Image (tube, helix red, strand yellow):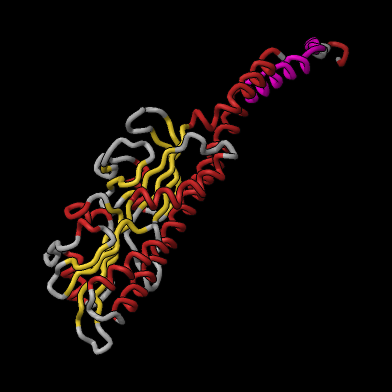
Amino acid sequence: MDSMRPTVTAPPSAPSPRAYPYTWLSKGLIALVAMSLFAILGIPYIVKQHLLRQSGEALQLTAHAIATSLGLVLDERFGDIQVFVATIGEIPESPAKIAVVLRKFKEVYPLYATLSFADRHGRLVASTDASEVGADVSRTSWYRDSVATGMVQVMGADALAAEQSKFAITYSASVTSQNGDFLGVVHTAILAKSLEQIIFPSITGKLSDLSLLKNAEYQVLSRSGRAFIDSTDVGDTNLLTLGVPSVVQSELHNEGWIEEVHRRRQVPVLSGYASLAAKPDFTGPNWKVLIRVDQADILGNIRLTLQLIGAGLAIT
C-alpha cells in the first residue's frame, strides 16, 4: 500500500539573485557628490557667518571702547568744574581777575570752547569769548538750574539745541564766597568737534591698521537719537526717528552688534553700538555710540578665495 502513496517532491528552489559587483562604487559616488555639494555650498556659508560674527563682535568692542573713553573725558570735566568753582570763589569780585583765571584755565584745558562767569544778576561779566561779555543769561536753563539746586548742571546736545546747538555738552555750577555768599555761576562748553577729534582718531586709527575699520562710519547720538557727531557729514539727523535698527536695538541693550541695511546707501552693513556707562558720582548724558562697516568690505578679502575653493571642488 505504501507504494501507492504519491511521492512528494520539494519545489524547485528559486535562483539566487546575481550580486552586482559594483554596488559599493555607486554608493561611494553618491556620497562623494553629497560631500562635494556640502563643501561647495556649506563651507562658504559657514566661513561667511563666522567672519561676520567675529567682525560684529569687534565692532561692538570698538563702540564700547569709544563710549568708555567718552565717559572718562566727560567725567574728568565734571571734576574740572568743581576746581573752577573753588578757584573763582577765592577771588574778590573782580571781573578782570576772573577773566584772567578763565583764560589761564582755557590754556591748560584747550578742550573747552568757552569758559565764562555770570554774576548774581545773571550777566556775563567774564568770558574767554569777549563777544559774550555783557550778555544776560539769567533766563537760560543752565543758569536758573545752577542757582536753584546749587549742584553741577550737565547739559547734553538735546537740552542745548534751543540755546547753543553748536555745543555738545556744557557744565555749570554756582559759586559762593568763603563766607557763603552767592557770587554767580561759572559755565563751560565743549564742542562736538573737539570731542570727536580727541576720541575717535586714537581708537579707529589703531583698528584701521588691521584693515577692519578703514571705511568705517561712526555716530554719537543724543538721548533723542540725534546724531550730533557724524563721520558721514550728512547734517543733523535723528536716526531713532528714522527707525534705524541698530539705534532701536541700542535703546533695548547697553551694547551689541547687528546686521542691517544702510538707511541711505541701501547696502548690507554690520553695526556695533554701545551706551556711555554711568558712574556713581557722575551720570553723564545718555549718549549712544554707533560704528558701522559695509559687509562687502569685510567679506571682500575672502570672497575670491571661497569662489576658487568652490570651483575647485566642483571640478573635482
Query: Is residue 85 shown above or below 14?
Result: below
Query: Is residue 19 shown above or below 83?
Result: above
Residue situated in front as seen by the camera: 74 or 316: 74
235 relative position to 232: left or right: left
Q: Please identify the quarter of the rendering in which residue 153 is found.
A: bottom left
* Camera sees residue 8: no
Q: What stretch is highlighted in magenta?
A: 12-39
Q: Is the magenta stretch mostly helix, strand or loop?
A: helix
Residue 22 is a magenta residue: yes
Which part of the image, by quadrant, shows the C terminus? top right
Q: Please identify the quarter of the rendering in which residue 236 is found.
A: top left
Residue 226 is a magenta residue: no
- Percent from the top left, x then y, of residue 157? 27, 54
Query: Is residue 61 shown above or below 218?
Result: below
- Percent from the top left, x then y, of residue 279? 40, 68
170 relative position to 306: left or right: left
At a point 20% along the width and 65% down the height, the residue shown is 142
- Percent from the top left, x then y, of residue 225? 28, 48
- Percent from the top left, x then y, of residue 144? 16, 70
Residue situated in front as seen by the camera: 198 or 157: 198
Q: Please identify the quarter of the rendering in which residue 259 is found.
A: top left
At a point 46% along the width and 58% down the height, the residue shown is 68
* Camera sees residue 190: yes
Residue situated in front as seen by the camera: 113 or 281: 113
